[in-house]
Amino acid sequence: MSNRRDFVKAVAAMSTGALLGGKWPSAWASNRSPRLAKFIQPLRGVGSGGIPLAASDGTRTRAGITAVHYSISMVQYEDQLHPDLPNPTRLWGYRPANIAAGDMRHLGGIVVAQRGVPVQVTATNALPATHILPVDASIMGAEKGQGANHASVHLHGGFVPWISDGGPHAWFDPQGGYGASATGSQPGSTIFNAVNPSLVAGQAEYYYPNLQGARMLWYHDHALGITRLNAYAGLASAYVITDSYESETMTTGYGLPGPLDPRTCYLVFQDKTFVGSETEALDPSWYFAMPASRAGDLWYPHRHEEGRLKKWTPLPAPHPSSVPEQFGDTILVNGIVAPYLEVEQRQYRLRLLNACNSRFLNPRLLFAKGASGVDATEAATNKPGPAFIQVGTEGGFLPAPVMLNGKGQPQLLLAPAERADLIVDFRDVPAGSILILYNDAAAPFPGGDAKEDFYPGNPKTPAAVPGFTPDTRTLLQIRVKARTGLADPSIELLKSGMQNPLDAPYPAGRAHRGATGCAGAAADAERRLRCLRPLDAGDRHRPARVRRRHARRGIRPSFRRGAYGDRERGLRRGVGNPQFISRHAPHALPPRQRAGAVAPGHQHEQLCGRSADLAGPAAGARRQ
């Protein structure tokens, strides 16, 4: 194999490609993961022995505001994701200071925060210079000379100051380089110095006010030109906010399992493809792009389908190329391949996150075909299991519970990055039963392509056989055991009025207004318009009232349609700053969800200026 690998790399270096008839033997980079036995390893839980929790290393006080502090490094490490993989998988991830290098696990660094108690994170970029996946150096943000280890930490779903939003242009690298949105107006200054003036090269500081009700957020990389690779490589973890309302639901009368209750299970789904013995044959250019790759490492698509590409351009695509979508053939749950979960005959709370790059999921419970052998690994699609009761989403608790996946009920659907907070009742499931958490959502959604739907019996995926991966339908096996010990108080849910009172709903017609009342909203819109860059020719001809209305609704000043559309969620341009600032700024939130200040000692009005201008004198937040 090594001789053939050397031959492939040598051929790849020849521009004429004469030895291969002028083109690669495979016009499109495809691969197939090795077969791995399903459901032979237990699901990793949260905490000791499982996915590491981040522990605080103290507090930081600035301008009279005290925040709980965490130190988190972005590192490369290895983790055995399945016993049958020949080597541990090389990954990138977030390692909190309390976790030793040898104890790092995939998706580690989970942060548990309390509403109203700010969190401050010092992030250190310790990533190696060479990426573990192929990098397209022809796209913005990843050009040659840029390096392949820049990163930006984004708290997905968090209401945070814009300087801590982790935008694509706010990246930083180990060498002390910073993106255009992160650099300040003074030489050597960055937006991160507004929160921590003592940062050193290769570090960034993030401030999270946590003025949101109980919910599951997650943080991941967001660096320009490389987000898809960094998140896939492992730069992602959970961020759980708790509050007094959730504590109330845990008491008698509600009985909801708490965020760290043994009956609360966090389930993070990813689809991956692994390098295996067939990779050289199926993707001859892989080892040219990744010469140090080995079996067990992650594989990522890096060449376009030339047949489709020629419809758009006669020019050849660069190699590696940025492929818009990625669909893996092997499902990971909580960072490992095809695990099983043991539950007792009790009610459980399942908190789901779809962390796939592109794949939608419609998880539901089905009984297995049998109780042992291969039949215990495959679902009987005509034998539904317990239904779901959804009580929350990425936006916190729902106003009322929703019944899902039962007879005549809607089906749960999770797009990438979406979350669901569910109650499942296993009390009436016979002990010894085997359930399969099953998914058959189309990929790409909603049209689908049969070759991206891996399951036994699909003629487009002949590698899928019962009992083994590749398989994208059987997500998780659940083994039901008899209850031991006392029964738990029954979970009692209100039919309505469940929404967290600490979360102010968006009033109809007033979403994202920064002030109360029509006059206040108009004044706020005028102020925002003054913060925007000059309007283009088409915008100048729009009436002022239209521009104000669009500003209130978060619509960009450019109304071009097409590839970018006329609405770019969460983005603004500031005077003197050619890069984006986030709509997650405090003035864009409902009154009860505003962060008090951009950072300790920095006022809202300063959002319109350049980033380093934030480092002014300490001042209290201006309440709007």
Image: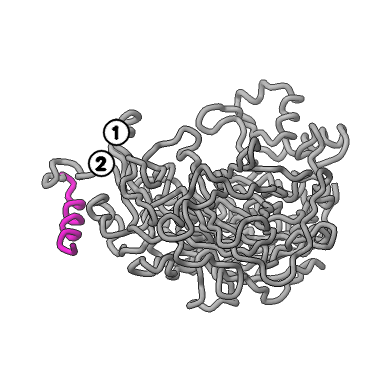
- Name the residue at 65% across, 48% down: 388
Question: Tag 1: Cα neighbours inside 10 Å, few (<14), some, or many (≥20)?
Answer: few
Q: Give the range drawn in magenta.
A: 1-16
Q: Which is more N-terminal, label 1 or label 2?
A: 2
- Amino acid beneath label 2: Ala
Tell me residue 204's x, y (percent): 59, 64
Labelled pair 2, 1 in contact (Cβ < 8 Å):
yes
Residue 283: percent from left, percent from top: 27, 50
> Residue 15: within the magenta?
yes
Which residue lies at the image location 53% right of the left edge and 65% below the top edge?
Answer: 43
Q: Is residue 136 left or right of residue 353?
A: left
Answer with left or right where residue 592 lies relative to residue 588.
Answer: right
In the image, which disc is placed on residue 307? Answer: 1
Whole-angstrom CA distance, mark 2 to mark 1, is: 8 Å
Q: Is residue 365 visible?
A: yes
| Left or right relative to 608: residue 204 | left
Estimate the x, y position of residue 549 in percent, counting from the top left: 74, 29
Q: How crowded is mark 2: few (under 14 residues within 10 Å), some or many (20 or more)?
A: some
Specify the label residue 621 is tagged with: none
Quadrant in the picture for residue 511 = top right
Q: Is residue 450 magenta?
A: no
Q: On the picture, is 340 further left or further right than 513?
A: left
Q: Which quadrant of the figure contains the N terminus?
A: bottom left
Residue type marked 1:
Gly
Which colour style is shown?
A: one colour
Disc on res. 27 = 2
Please say if 238 is above or below 365: below
